[in-house]
Image (spheres, grey):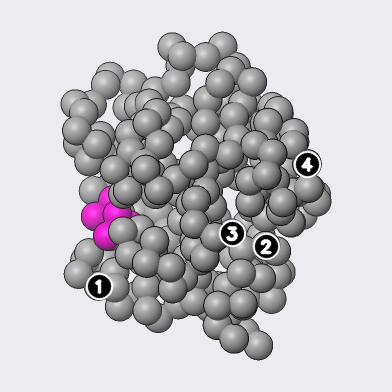
Amino acid sequence: MSVRIGITCGWRESEQKHLLHEEYVRAVASEGAVPVLLPSVAPELAEYYYNMVDGVLFSGGDDIDPSYFGEEPVAALGEITPKRDGFELKLAQLCLQGKNPVFGICRGIQLLNVALGGTLHQDIGHLSGLMHNQKAPRTHTVHQVDVAAGSRLHKILGATSIRVNSYHHQALNQPAKPLVVTAHSRDGLIEAVEADQEDVFCLAVQWHPECTYPVDAFSRKLFAAFVEEVKKKVI
Ligand code: MN
């Protein structure tokens, strides 16, 4: 049976365009689910979209407006997209109700954390000498991530240390209460979180498994576990 997975999209204000890398669509479809692209519409419509799909994937993209976690913008803050922030934050707040399994990628982990009351490092340049914004091809893994033993992430991957790609200049600072940190890079930055509730699948990573999906077994395991969870909820 087919399940519908909503994937949030980027928004380019200057071109008035919604954007999504094909890699997300391909990974979701390859696992046998139906990808549904979610535009950044008025926040009031978030609940409608939430109910229309069976699972939600928060995709990567621009920085989140730091006013949502009570901070003034630092000089190194990247582009922000208020239209996208408004829709996604509302959608994320619905997600821990448990009906829809949730998977967050890159901006997605940050978005979920902010929506639940956590904070971000607006720019990690001064925090770490580790390169988190790789120049290598998107399918190439560049740094190590250590996974917390016993976590859901650990059970999915079947490993306590894996290599991942990296395209971020921000990272989680204070994790929001319902989330537990389940992976770190070797410089101590947060690379994955999950909800600490057995009945709620809410898992998010700072790297981009959709890019490595065609070449990396761990990336495939992540998408497979997410889609399997969505199917379990629907049946
Ligand atoms: Mn990284």
The disc, 3 or 2, on the residue closer to the chain's N-terminal end is 3
Label 1: which secondary element: helix
Q: CA distance from mark 2 to mark 1?
A: 28 Å
Q: Earlier in the sequence, mark 3 or mark 4?
A: 3
Between the C-alphas of marks 2 and 4, the distance is: 15 Å
Q: Position of residue 76 (x, y in %)?
A: 34, 21
Residue type at the position of mark 1: Leu
Task: Residue 221: tell me if it is visible.
Answer: yes
Magenta residues, start to end: 85-90
Mark 2 CB near ligand 1 (8 Å cut):
no
Picture layout, residue 30 above or below residue 115: below
Specify the quadrant that holds the C terminus: bottom right
Marks 4 and 1, the one that precedes in the sequence: 1
Tell me if label 3 and label 2 are in contact, CB under 8 Å.
no
Tell me if mark 2 has few (under 14), some (14-19) or many (20+) residues whose alpha carbon lies within 10 angstroms of its own: some
Instruction: Determine contact: label 4, label 1, CB under 8 Å.
Output: no
- Return the residue at label 4: 159
Mark carried by residue 225 = 2
Residue 162 in the image: x percent, y percent? 75, 36
The residue under label 3 is 24
Q: Within the magenta stretch, is there residue 88?
A: yes
Overall secondary structure of the magenta section: helix
- Residue at point 59% right, 29% down? 184
Frontmost residue, 185 versus 167: 185
Q: Residue at x 58, y 18 (%)?
A: 187
Q: Position of residue 70 (x, y in %)?
A: 19, 33
Q: Are marks 2 and 1 in contact (CB under 8 Å)?
A: no
Give the Cα separation between the discs numbered 1 and 3.
Answer: 23 Å
Q: Is mark 4 within 8 Å of ligand 1?
A: no
